[in-house]
Image: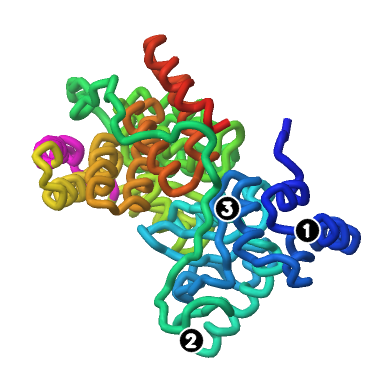
Amino acid sequence: MDQRIPIGRLLVERGVARLADVEAAAATARVGDSRLCSKLLEANACDEGDLVAALAELHRLPGVDLSRTVVDLAALDFIPQAVAEADLLLPISVEGGRLHLAVASPSESARVVSEVRFVTGREVSLYVVVLHALRAAIAACYEAREKGTAVWRGHAAPQDAGPQLAVRTPPLAGAALTDDFEIVDEVPVEEVVHAVAVQGGPRRVLVVDDEPAIRLLVQRALEHRGFAVETAQNGQEALEMARGSPDLVLLDAMLPKLHGFEVARRLRADPATRRIPIIIMSAVYRGWRFAQDARDSFGAEDYVEKPFRVDDLLRRIDAVLEARPASQGTAAIPLVESGRDALAKGRFADATAQFEEATRIDPFSAEAHFGLGEALRAKGELFQAMSALERALELRPVLLPAMRTLASLYLEKGFRSKAAEILERAVGVARDPETRERLRQELIPLL
């Protein structure tokens, strides 16, 4: 149940607005179109920064005072203007390789944020803003970009300032997380999959598609070329059958029960299946952005749009099987070890370089991404550290040390709700009662 204080009451209690102004604004606000804070801002009854501070407290997210913000308009390249206007979101920064978005309704923006994350391949950080200011800023920013302007300045922003966000963070209740966490679980250098005896016979391909006609077409074409073919009709079947270590998985993106991209992610997260080459097929997702995201985010070796030519599909399968390196994962292990050694000795730049190379060689090593997050945090590059730690947890959702570090960073940057979400996950992961209780005590002030 939502137990947040109504925004009008919060504004009056904080001394941001007079009761008479709040009542007048509430009387003129149209439900579903305009809002109380927007009416107060339009009437010049409140400063935008004060309204943003109240919204940040209400939503437990950082807020941005757009009137004092300077936006690098290169960030707009990630969101088309029509999407920004329809979904009421504005890209305001790409600091740390993340896409920072201003929204008026964080809860209502969850769906579109997921789509933005998928299309851009970037992690997203949300900031709450006043709706009236957001609408005006969207129009002004895209208009300025059309005119060739490099930055957009809010009306109260310093004229000589470079890109900057006027962030207001929500107040904290109780004690904050600290940096002196005890690491309660040792992080293994790498999970080693036991070698299996090489077996003779044809190479095996697992074909995953919910359309029987497609499965039969591909199966016949592959068997004609001498492949042994197994088929699955949904994502759950695919995960179970992939444990048999086929030589390649041909995976449809749109599957019942479990989305094809989620199947690919789980295959890469599981040490028993992470080395299996994947080719993703789709009739829905098209274009270079989807193809690149399939490769970068989900570890697919190739991406094929439906409808496809059978001869082209066979050529791509041959190319993937011939090019797949056998020792990709093991080559990253010494780099992870040397990165940890450099981190322990305070050589943060060296540690970062070692972990970055490890993630390049093996993009699906949770240990490499976790180490990179720790090294970037030590260097003060906090948003980059958050992205690396999020990737580590995506690959290994039970990596408790990564959860605790990420919760600390979220809290440090003002994302209180995200910190609480991560700590709640950590409580469920912790193995011993003492650790679970400590995590609960850290979580309580954030609820």
Contact between labelled residues 1 and 3, with CB atoms less than 8 Å apart: no
- Indicate which label's residue lies in the foreground, 3 or 1: 1
Name the element at disc 3.
helix
Residue indicated by mark 2: 149
Q: Quadrant of the C terminus?
A: top right
Q: Is residue 306 visible?
A: no
Q: Residues within 10 Å of mark 1 (few under 14, many from 20)?
A: some
Contact between labelled residues 3 and 2, with CB atoms less than 8 Å apart: no
- What separation in Å lies between label 3 and label 1 (alpha carbons)? 35 Å
Name the element at disc 1.
loop
Q: Earlier in the sequence, mark 2 or mark 3?
A: 3
- What separation in Å lies between label 2 and label 3 (alpha carbons)? 27 Å
Residue indicated by mark 1: 18
**Front residue of 88 and 279:** 88
- Label drawn at residue 113: 3
Q: Is residue 139 visible?
A: yes
Left or right of 294 on screen, residue 348? left
Which residues lie in the magenta part? Answer: 320-342
- Label drawn at residue 67: none
**Front residue of 2 and 359:** 2
Q: Name which residue lies at 33% across and 54% down.
A: 315
Left or right of 51 on screen, residue 309? left
Contact between labelled residues 2 and 1, with CB atoms less than 8 Å apart: no
Q: Residues within 10 Å of mark 3 (few under 14, many from 20)?
A: some
- What separation in Å lies between label 1 and label 2 (alpha carbons)? 39 Å
Q: Quadrant of the N terminus?
A: top right
The dominant secondary structure in magenta is: helix
- Report the residue that reaches farthest toward the bottom: 147
